[in-house]
Amino acid sequence: MDITSLTAMEIREKIANKEISAQEVIKAHLDRIKELDGDLNAFITITEEEAFEAAKRVDEKVKNGEKLGKLAGIPIGVKDNIVTKDIRTTAGSKMLENFIPPYDATVIKRIKEEDGIILGKTNLDEFAGSYSTESSYFGVTKNPIDRERVPGGSSGGSTAAVRAQEVALALGSDTGGSNRQPASYCGIVGIKPSYGLVSRHGLIPLSNSLDVVGSFARNVTDASLLLDVIAGRDEKDPTAMDIERGSYLEGLTGDIKGMKVALPKEYMNMPMDARVKEKVLQAAKVFEKLGAHVEEVSLPHAKYAWATYYLIVVSEISSAMAKYDGVSYGHRTEDYESLDELFIKSRTEGLGEEIKRSIMAGTYILSTEEGRKYYEKAFRVRALLKEDFDRVFEKYDVILTPTTPNLPFKIGESVKNPTEMYGSGIFCIPANVVGLCALSVPCGYVHGLPVGLQIMGDRFKEANILKAAYAFEGELSLGGDK
């Protein structure tokens, strides 16, 4: 039996039926990591000892006939901007290279309560601030499909680990596409929940009004399983709302007859690789074949989404990064003679070039009269974007778009063409700006490289996008296992 090729649901079922032990599952996946990750670099920290201890507890439950959690024995990777008690959490930065958190993030606590087993912390763009997983202090992560290409970002370590079968599930964070864009590049499923569905307590913030925690898997069922566990109100996070919902897993019926599907003309007319556009249009025909009603709609303010996002995100990055000053915690320079010199040298040494650019841009916007005018205008346009989507969702259940306008680019190309790298998030950004739920599901391959279909839903209507993705996945039969 090839344990690492099993789905998360299959792993739990086989452990419950005593066909395999949790310790065997963990050993197989750790062996896989040892085999692949020296080259792939999906992980920053491996938690082998902790994982085996957790596996032993699961096996004891099985032996004693105790009730198993929803994630019993399933190996999980965690993006390294989500804090884990007594386990190094770096955010991919030298600034936090040796930071050991004293508590678990709420999502980590919920995973452990359901007997999920964390194998380690995955690589990411520094502080989750880019789109390729090339800006990490801990080196570049490679795409398992083509080692010369990026896995996308900023959650590239999590997506690469899932695609390479180093873990069955993974957590990521999404500020402007950082779950969906790398899911598309690695040919797996990535979910960006509605803002407020999942607690952000313990997520190292990049942009507080945009960040969310989401899930990765090689199929929709497994990704839904993890989302079921991490979603819900949290007293420690005032933005995590108490939403009435059923089980996302139970809503995966495969029947989408009569579902109303919108295809926005503004998005489909944006510059993109023609092969990507073709795959998405073919996907729309699959929805029609399954009995859904697909119609073209208009989102007239779509062209302003990226500029609106950029003004908001860099301003919030500037604010979020201000605490890394070399005083409270994080990297502190060894050579300084004044407080100002301590601040300057600590930040210069501890932060990478990519995040510094965002800090500089955000500081300019927040500190100049002209910049504040643009920042205030961005929030007015944000309201217009919300009105556009509200109007569409009055009539339609889901919206289809490409996940990215391009195929995975080669490592190093982002330095030559940063515009293309940042442009890879153009279709994902609106969901963050407006707070919608969205996911990426594989919809085909071009010369062996994956193309992702983005399915967006109204706020807290995750059941709609998961139901649509599950039916589509079942018809196309791609998943993360081409």
Image (cartoon, rainbow, N blue to C red):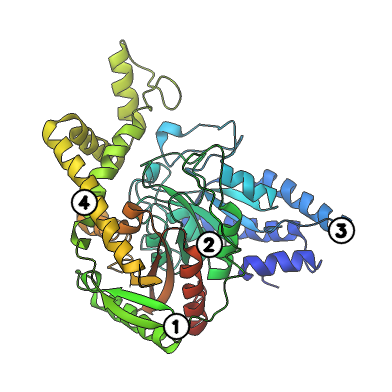
Evaluate if marks 3 and 4 touch, with contact meaning CB atoms under 8 Å apart. Answer: no
Evaluate if marks 2 and 1 touch, with contact meaning CB atoms under 8 Å apart. Answer: no
Rendered view: 257 above or below 429:
below
Say if residue 413 shows up in the picture. no
Q: Which residue type does callout 3 highlight?
A: Gly
Q: Please tell me whether mark 2 sits on a helix, a strand or a loop.
A: helix
Going from N to C along the chain, the mark reached first, 1 or 3, is: 3
* Outermost residue toward the right in this view: 64
Distance from the alpha carbon under mark 2 to that under mark 3: 30 Å
Distance from the alpha carbon under mark 1 to that under mark 4: 33 Å
User: Can you tell which of label 1 and label 3 is closer to the viewer?
Assistant: 1
Nearest to the observer: residue 363 or residue 303: 303
Evaluate if marks 2 and 4 touch, with contact meaning CB atoms under 8 Å apart. Answer: no
Q: Which residue is mark 2?
A: 162
Q: Which residue is mark 1?
A: 258
Distance from the alpha carbon under mark 2 to that under mark 4: 37 Å
Distance from the alpha carbon under mark 1 to that under mark 3: 44 Å
**Image x and y of residue 313, in percent:** 29, 44
How crowded pointer 2 is (Cα within 10 Å; few <14, some 14-19, many 20+) is rated as: many
User: Can you tell which of label 2 and label 3 is closer to the viewer?
Assistant: 3
User: Can you tell which of label 3 and label 4 is closer to the viewer?
Assistant: 4
**Image x and y of residue 111, in percent:** 63, 50
Rendered view: 124 above or below 98:
below
Evaluate if marks 1 and 3 touch, with contact meaning CB atoms under 8 Å apart. Answer: no
Distance from the alpha carbon under mark 2 to that under mark 1: 33 Å
Q: Which residue is mark 3?
A: 65
Going from N to C along the chain, the mark reached first, 1 or 4, is: 1
User: Can you tell which of label 2 and label 1 is closer to the viewer?
Assistant: 1
Distance from the alpha carbon under mark 3 to that under mark 4: 56 Å
Nearest to the observer: residue 103 or residue 351: 103
User: Can you tell which of label 2 and label 4 is closer to the viewer?
Assistant: 4
The label shown at residue 381 is 4
